[in-house]
Image: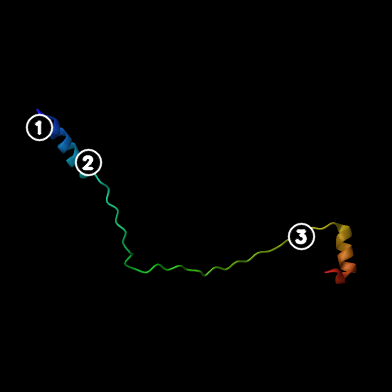
Amino acid sequence: MKTLIAVPGVLLAMLLSGCTPRIEVAAPKEPITINMNVKIEHEIHIKVDKDVETLLKSRSDLF
């Protein structure tokens, strides 16, 4: 009677041990290259009032 109880437990253990996940970490065959050729351009547009624009034209030494 004890063997009838133990057989399903052994079968369950065998089934669960066959389902263990396998994780493998391996280095790539080719080296990793990072292309850093980046060109950054920007433009700044400033809108000013007419009074400020005339002031900047008349007093160019402010900036």
Residue 40 to residue 3: above or below: below
Q: What amino acid does circle 1 point to?
A: Thr
- Locate residue 58, reporting x and y percent: 90, 68
Mark 1 and mark 3 lie on one chain; the one further toward the N terminus is: 1
Q: Nearer the viewer, residue 32 or 25?
A: 25
Q: Quadrant of the N terminus?
A: top left
Asked if the residue at tag 1 contacts the one at tag 2, i.e. Cβ–Cβ closer than 8 Å, the answer is no
Q: Secondary structure at mark 1?
A: helix
- Locate residue 44, reporting x and y percent: 71, 62
Task: Measure the alpha-carbon separation of dots 1 and 3.
Answer: 88 Å
Q: Nearer the viewer, residue 55 or 20?
A: 20
Residue where numbered disc 3 is placed = 46
Q: Secondary structure at mark 3?
A: loop
Mark 3 and mark 2 lie on one chain; the one further toward the N terminus is: 2
Q: Nearer the viewer, residue 8 or 39?
A: 8
Task: Measure the alpha-carbon separation of dots 3 and 2.
Answer: 69 Å
Q: Residue at x 40, y 67 (%)?
A: 32
Mark 2 and mark 1 lie on one chain; the one further toward the N terminus is: 1
Residue where numbered disc 1 is placed = 3
Of circles 3 and 2, which is in front? 2
Q: Residue at x 19, y 40 (%)?
A: 13
Horizontal side of residue 14 vs 32, given as left or right = left
Q: Which mark is residue 16?
A: 2
Q: Quadrant of the C terminus?
A: bottom right
Q: What amino acid does circle 2 point to?
A: Leu
Q: Quadrant of residue 28?
A: bottom left
Task: Measure the alpha-carbon separation of dots 2 and 1.
Answer: 20 Å
Q: Quadrant of residue 60?
A: bottom right
Of circles 2 and 1, which is in front? 1
Task: Please identify the residue farthest to the front as the structure is shown.
Answer: 2
| Number of residue marks | 3
Q: Secondary structure at mark 2?
A: helix
